């Protein structure tokens, strides 16, 4: 999926029922959601919350020069997501609020915070 066109939407509140993730292409989800400056994404449950969708969003943040600056409201990242991907992607944002991560994932986030400050 190519670079998304600029949208007029500055803030997007997303609450997807876990069963509906299978109806949305992970690539479309990643490209579209990363194209908004502020994302209020509520996914409180692990089961069925779209590991592929979370990876697609984090990859879109890493690969594209996306306008997303803020990710908030109880984002529970799947434990199976590569900690380094989460660490690098979240460090590209200006604000991350209420992200629930595993011990390895938080360690990668902190390691990337130190690496960014040292550069």
Image (cartoon, rainbow, N blue to C red):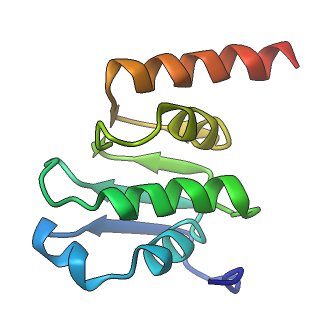
Kindly identify the residue that appears in the image at 51 percent across and 39 percent down.
86
Q: Which of the image's four quarters has the N terminus?
A: bottom right
Q: Where is residue 113 in the image (x, y as percent from the top left)?
A: 66, 20
Residue 60 falls in image quadrant = bottom right
Q: In this view, does 33 lie above or below 69?
A: below
Judged left or right of residue 49, residue 11 is right
Q: In this view, does 98 lie above or below 71?
A: above
Kindly identify the residue that appears in the image at 52 percent across and 77 percent down.
32
Q: Which of the image's four quarters has the C terminus?
A: top right
Q: In this view, does 82 lie above or below 52?
A: above
Kindly identify the residue that appears in the image at 40 percent across and 46 percent down.
72
Q: Position of residue 108 (x, y in %)?
A: 53, 23
Judged left or right of residue 112, residue 25 is left
Kindly identify the residue that appears in the image at 49 percent across and 63 percent down.
56
Q: In this view, does 109 lie above or below 91?
A: above
Q: Position of residue 87 (x, y in %)?
A: 56, 32
Judged left or right of residue 78, residue 46 is left
Q: Position of residue 47 (x, y in %)?
A: 12, 53
The image shows a total of numbered marks equal to: 0
Which is nearer the eye, 1 or 15? Answer: 1
Residue sitting at the far right: 119
């Amino acid at each position: 999926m190519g670079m998304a066109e600029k949208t007029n939407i500055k803030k997007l509140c997303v609450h997807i029922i876990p069963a509906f993730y299978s109806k949305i292409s992970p690539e479309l989800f990643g490209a579209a959601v990363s194209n908004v400056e502020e994302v209020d994404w509520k996914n409180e449950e692990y089961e069925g919350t779209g590991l592929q969708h979370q990876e697609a969003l984090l990859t879109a943040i890493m690969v594209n020069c996306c306008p997303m600056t803020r990710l908030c409201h109880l984002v529970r990242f799947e434990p199976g997501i590569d900690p380094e991907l989460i660490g690098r992607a979240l460090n590209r944002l200006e604000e991350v609020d209420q992200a629930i991560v595993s011990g390895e994932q938080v360690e990668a986030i902190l390691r990337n915070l130190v690496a960014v400050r040292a550069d």
